[in-house]
Image (cartoon, rainbow, N blue to C red):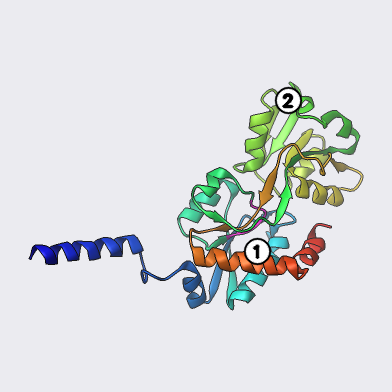
Amino acid sequence: MLRRRSLAALALAAAFLAGPGRADESRLDRIVASGTLRVGSTGDYKPFTYRDPSTGAFSGFDIDMAESLAKALGVKVEVVQTKWSDLMKDFEADRFDVGMGGISVTLDRARKAYFSLPMLREGKTPITKCENVAKFEALADIDKPGVRVIVNPGGTNERFARANAKNAAITVFPDNTTIFDEIAAGRADLMMTDASETRFQQKQHPGVLCAVHPDKPFDFAEKAYLLPRDTGLKQFVDQWLHLQMETGVFTSTLKKWID
């Protein structure tokens, strides 16, 4: 009797640890079986991800990459909108399978998730009105009373600004799709964001906004895809991304949106 109870207890514990589905079933298996890859994306970070407010359609570099990944898996894409402030909460709640859309690798995120191979190397740098570029070349130039820094809420941009611009005035602006218009209109002096975004926004505001030394950012960062702690899925995504890079598909897709 005691032995049977011990075996039953072990079986119950194994079932609890395995969670829903088969004990040996990976997230990769579940995605293929469901026929759908759920991609979490904020939709507010051009050129990586953008959601058209009138149609609800998503576009951008990482949306194209999501379509490519889904094709490699033999499934369709379902884009699940999230927010930077809710990214990890939605990830932990299993609202999506993969996070894509200009996501930076951070140690806080890595405590809870895997990341794919890094796909871009960059860092934070300012973007400001073109006539003010010489004023904001160093962090010491920005970290001064009277300097107006604008940030989008909840992501690495806000974290970097609060850590490095303690004496400047920091304004949190909720709409990341129109935040650069605030600088162009003179209601903010600058934003510190990823170098790729400053290059893109400089092209969207020619002669008005200029990226400040995007080739020499203030820090080092990498972008990658956010993954659950599933070895099978990570291995597949890493191999797919490796092939995209080696065959030139990654570079051609990147040039479509950023170059």
- State whether residue 192 appears in this view: yes
Give the x, y percent position of residue 36.
54, 73
Does 218 appear above or below 68? above
Residue in the foreground of this view, choosing between 158 and 109: 109
Relative to 145, does residue 245 appear above or below in the rendering?
below
> Looking at the image, which residue sits at the far left?
1
Main structural element of the magenta stretch: helix, strand or loop? Answer: loop
Q: Residues within 10 Å of mark 2 (few under 14, many from 20)?
A: many
Amino acid, disc 1: Gly
Mark 1 / mark 2, whichever is N-terminal: 1
Q: Quadrant of the N terminus?
A: bottom left
Tell me the residue that label 1 is attached to: 56
Q: Which residues are magenta?
A: 99-103
Residue 60 appears anywhere in the view: no
Q: Residues within 10 Å of mark 1 (few under 14, many from 20)?
A: few
Q: Which residue is mark 2?
A: 143
Residue 215 percent across, percent down from the top left: 82, 44
